[in-house]
Amino acid sequence: MSVKEKGCFYCDPDHQGRKDLMIEVGKMKEGILYLFKDQAHLGRCVVAVPEHKSELFDLEPKQRHDYIDDVAAAAKAVKKLWGCTKINYGAYGDKLPHLHFHLVPKYEGGFEFGGSFAIGNEEPKFLTEEEYGEMIAKLKKELNM
């Protein structure tokens, strides 16, 4: 990792804002996988580049290849584990210096299916610590982490 900043959403291991939103699942080839605490979209997660690089073209070719492989592997695992109909991908954060893709599973007949995705849900769904632990264990097993 080239740049580490105290207070940076992804660099700072103690960043409270990130801890309030998501749980770290683990390191992949190039990215870090996080599971969102709000599981209104069952399996929603994000894959972030651990360096201060905010665009795909900022990554070296091998980094870019490995990062996209990570995004694809995480999406495939989510789809296999929780059977969503479609995964929507989003790169949000105009001011955040870390490239990251949100993986938003959508379920036919379910919350927001066929419509726009809202970053914050009007009806968030939070799980127990045990349920988050089970989801993380399944992801790690599926991704060989």
Image (cartoon, rainbow, N blue to C red):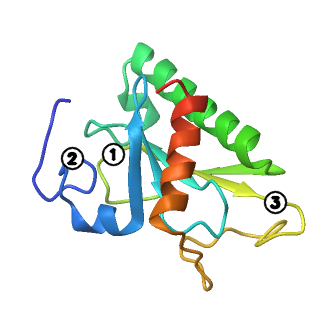
Which residue is located at x 55 percent, y 50 percent? 134
- Residue 65 is left or right of residue 8, and the answer is right
Location of residue 117 in the rendering, given as x and y in whole percent from the top left corner: 67, 68
Location of residue 88 in the rendering, given as x and y in whole percent from the top left corner: 69, 52
Can you identify the residue that label 2 sits on? 11
Residue type at mark 2 is Cys
* Labels 1, 2: front one: 2
Which residue is located at x 59 percent, y 75 percent? 125
Q: Quadrant of residue 44?
A: bottom right
Of label 3 and label 2, which has the lower sequence position? 2
Q: CA distance from mark 3 to mark 2?
A: 32 Å
- Number of residues whose C-alpha sits closer than 10 Å to that of mark 3, classed few (under 14), some (14–19) or many (20 or more): some
Q: In the rendered structure, are the residues bearing label 1 and label 2 in contact, judged by CB atoms less than 8 Å apart?
A: yes
Q: Residue furthest top?
A: 62
Q: CA distance from mark 3 to mark 1?
A: 28 Å
Q: CA distance from mark 1 to mark 2?
A: 9 Å
- Residue 3 is left or right of residue 100, and the answer is left
Q: Is residue 60 above or below residue 43?
A: above
Residue in front for this viewpoint, 37 or 111: 37
Of label 3 and label 1, which has the lower sequence position? 1
Residue type at mark 1 is His
Which residue is located at x 48 percent, y 20 percent? 66
Can you identify the residue that label 3 sits on? 107
Q: Which mark is residue 98?
A: 1
* Labels 3, 1: front one: 3
Q: Is residue 127 above or below residue 3?
A: below
